[in-house]
Amino acid sequence: MKVLLLTASLLLVQFTFGQSKKEQINILTIKVDSLNRVLSQLNSNITQLQNQKNQLSDEKNLFVKENSSLINNLNERKSTITNLNVSLLKKENEITRLKDSLDLVYSNNQLLPLIKSSTYAGEYSFEYKDGPAGFLQLYFDGKEDYYFLLEYVKGPPSYNMGTLEGIMKVYGNIGVFDAQMYGQDACKIAFVFDSNGVFIRQYPEGEECGFGGNVYITQHYYKNNSDNKSIQPSVNSSGTFTKSTNRW
């Protein structure tokens, strides 16, 4: 009996132990499955992060490329601006020199030889994009007078204009027009001829010449041709008053 009881007890212990191990295996299986799901999710996250990293890397490379292109464009623009500033400075210096020469002529009344030829006859003009434009025609009468027709357009937005016909003499390379036209002050205009054309300056830059609002003709006109085409400006009995129009 004791042997049977002992045998039954051993069988029961073995059965109980076997059932506990199975449960442990099930628990471990569940844990392994859970870990596999976590690992799978981690792998998915890693893949997403890697894709994001690659995308960021591509965006970085694109940004670096665009930034390099912008820097090159900026350097080119800086170089262009520098060249333009140099050209502008040269032009301003030339204009200052010419203005000083004109001021010297008026202040010292320098006498230069009277030009009695058609040396400076012809057509002159200038035009700036979206800016002012001008036209000058000079005709030598065969004696000692130059007849001129001068037109100037200020440009946008007002497009105010000025037109002037007159007679002047040229001394050396300088012609001076001086006539009483409007008001108490005289309209004075100096023409300084050079190898490229003529620099024109108005004295003073006011309304004495009858031009449109804020129209001042101080500018360099480039020579187009040397044709001595006959023009006959309208003059009064004294031969000094000329015709000025387009006063708006």
Image (spheres, grey):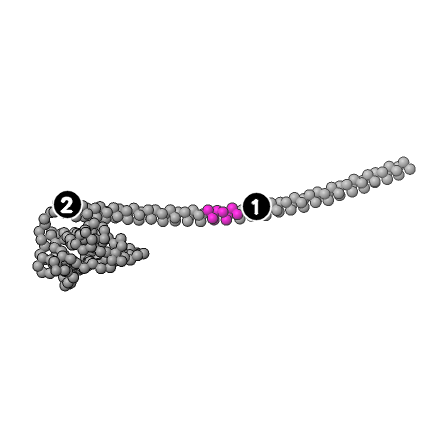
Question: Percent from the top left, x then y, of residue 205?
Answer: 22, 50
Residue 196 found in image quarter: bottom left
Q: Is residue 49 magenta?
A: no
Q: Tell me the amino acid under the disc marked 1.
A: Ile
Q: Tell me the amino acid under the disc marked 2.
A: Ser
Magenta region: 52-60
Q: Main secondary structure of the magenta part?
A: helix
Question: Would you say 184 lies left or right of 35 here?
Answer: left
| Residues under numbered marks 2 and 1 in contact, where contact means CB atoms less than 8 Å apart | no
Depth check: give the residue in front, 28 or 145. Answer: 145
Q: Which residue is mark 1?
A: 46
In space, the residues marked 2 and 1 are separated at their CA atoms by 87 Å
- Label 2 CA crowd tier, 10 Å (few <14, some 14–19, many 20+): few
Depth check: give the residue in front, 57 or 241. Answer: 241
- Label 1 CA crowd tier, 10 Å (few <14, some 14–19, many 20+): few
Which numbered disc covers residue 56? none
Residue 16 seen in the figure = yes
Residue 226 seen in the figure = no
- Residue that protrudes farthest toward the front in the picture: 184
Residue found 21% across the figure and 49% down from its top: 204
Q: Which residue is mark 2?
A: 107
Question: Percent from the top left, x then y, of residue 39?
Answer: 62, 45
Q: Secondary structure at mark 2?
A: helix
Question: Percent from the top left, x then y, of residue 146?
Answer: 13, 58
Comparing labels 2 and 1, the label whose residue is closer to the camera: 2
Residue found 78% across the figure and 42% down from its top: 19
Q: Is 50 located above or below residue 181 in the figure?
A: above
Name which of mark 2 and mark 1 comes first in the sequence. 1
Q: Secondary structure at mark 1?
A: helix
Residue 225 found in image quarter: bottom left
